[in-house]
Amino acid sequence: MLGPVNFCVRTFVSLSAMSTVLQAYRFALDPTPQQQADLRSHCGGQRYAYNWGLARNKANLDQRAAEKSYDVPEIQLTTPLPWSAYSLRKDWNRAKAAVAPWWSENSKEAYSSGLANLATALTNWQNSRTGERRGRKLSFPKFRGKRSTLSCRVTTGAIGLVDSDRRHVKLPRIGTVRTHESTRKLARHIERGAARIRSATVSRRSGRWFCSFSVEIIRSDPTPSQPDSVVGVDLGLKSLAVLSTGRVIPNPKHLEAVQGRLRRLNRQASRRIGPDKATAQKPSARWRKTQARVAKLHAQVANARRDGLHKLTTSLVREHGVIVLEDLNVSGMIRNRFLARHIADVGMAELRRHVQYKSARRGVQMIIASRWYPSSKTCSGCGAMKAKLPLRVRAFHCDECDLVIDRDLNAAHNLAALAIETTGSTSTASCVGTLNKPDGNPRKTRNLRATGTATGRPAQPRAGQRRRRKATTA
């Protein structure tokens, strides 16, 4: 049996009970037909400025790459174009009269937001190439087509709420737009001087226009009702979450519930005339109508999922002082084509994001257990570890103490116990717990041999390697 293994955790230090944070307030809009045309024009101007700046910088980079291929000295290369937001706006102001004579129809903020987005995209690409940005390598920014998401950000001008009825918002060059819902939640904070609007972003999603305000607000959230309580949260597919307290939150499976309607609508769309780039064929009105119904159905599923996650995470931070989650590799789990749709329907990464920012507001300590911590394979009673525990086995049976418990509840108990050992200590995110390091694979759990012994039979070659070997021998 292996001895105790120290698996590193990540502890997020919470903010104080009263702090100034950036928060978004999003409201659905009910614009008039003329206002819809103006909103589309502003979003189109944002896209045009983005593509204009991207084309200039791409041509400059391609020219420099071609000159380098001919061994042109560095001092004789074409001067590189700066891609900061300030430089891009300066170049745009000099060229807009020639490249976009219609620029005065929209607010200058529409073009500035597109150039600011381009500056961010190019900077992220450059930092990814040089290793300054963590994560996967980013590809060079691509041009945005007319089917891309319509959005436009405004930072200056007449931005705000209409105080008379709390059912209108003010946008520059567009005017006063009616909202589908009341804006009193934000208006009350502004009236008492606890909030300040920094920017507004209009976007069109699933057939509806939205206006999202970025607000600098002073929050004073109450502390949890049980500050000394520790809860471990085990996420899964059978149940959305199993808490160490014994509470089980069922998985509503929002997407699975509408699969029949989605299949019917997709079959209906396949029988209608859709777009074809090869023949420049335009989609029919019935095809567009069916796609709008599909988008509306997906929006309903996303809204229901978001509502459930908000209710769950809010209840966690209101009750418990310490919350323990696992560092799940969601992007890797989705690669399983048999479970990809079910995993995506849960929203595991979104749940962790909600807990992270909500716990910081309420003074709750959030602990992220290491990705390699064997919470499901470890007995919550005696601490013994199993070598294997397939997903089809839903009950954990300990061979040492004969404990029989649901595997998800067992994992939640282990996560809660891990918090008791690490509360008050902070470790770096680069720490990774290891098992049987002399034996080769540090991420494999074994309990059938002592540390340092031989790992057994050698690894068998894969099917493709065996076929190649047979072909070479023949």
Image (cartoon, rainbow, N blue to C red):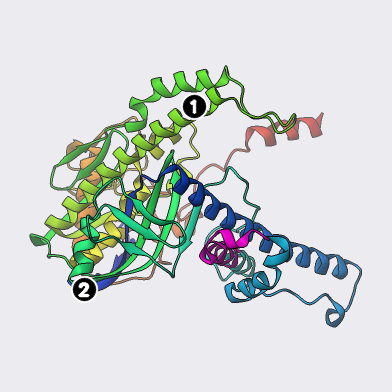
Q: Mostly what secondary structure, the magenta segment?
A: helix
Residue 114 falls within the magenta-colored stretch:
yes
Residue type at tag 2: Gly
Residue type at tag 1: Lys
Which residue corresponds to mark 1? 289
Image vertical order of residue 348 relative to residue 46, above or below: above
In the rendered view, does 352 fall on the left or right side of 442? Answer: left
Which residue corresponds to mark 2? 193
Spot occupied by residue 69 in the image (x, y as percentages of width and height)? 88, 66
Q: Is residue 4 visible?
A: no
Q: Residue at x 51, y 55 (%)?
A: 440
In the rendered view, does 287 fall on the left or right side of 413? Answer: right
Q: Are marks 2 and 1 in contact (CB under 8 Å)?
A: no
Residue 273 falls within the magenta-colored stretch:
no
- Give the secondary structure at mark 1: helix
Highlighted range, magenta: 101-121
Circle on res. 130: none
Counting other residues with Cα less than 10 Å from the Cα at mark 2, is it few (<14), some (14-19), or many (20 or more)? few
Q: Which residue is drawn at 54% across and 59% down?
A: 106
Q: Residue at x 14, y 42 (%)?
A: 247
Using the image as rendered, state which of residue 331 and residue 174 is in the foreground: 174
Spot occupied by residue 56 in the image (x, y as percentages of width and height)? 73, 64
Q: Which of marks 2 and 1 is nearer the N terminus?
A: 2
Q: Quadrant of residue 116?
A: bottom right
Counting other residues with Cα less than 10 Å from the Cα at mark 1, is it few (<14), some (14-19), or many (20 or more)? few
Image vertical order of residue 102 relative to residue 238, above or below: below
- Give the secondary structure at mark 2: loop
Q: Can residue 148 be seen in this view?
A: yes
Mark 2 and mark 1: span between their CA atoms?
45 Å
In the rendered view, does 377 fall on the left or right side of 127? Answer: left
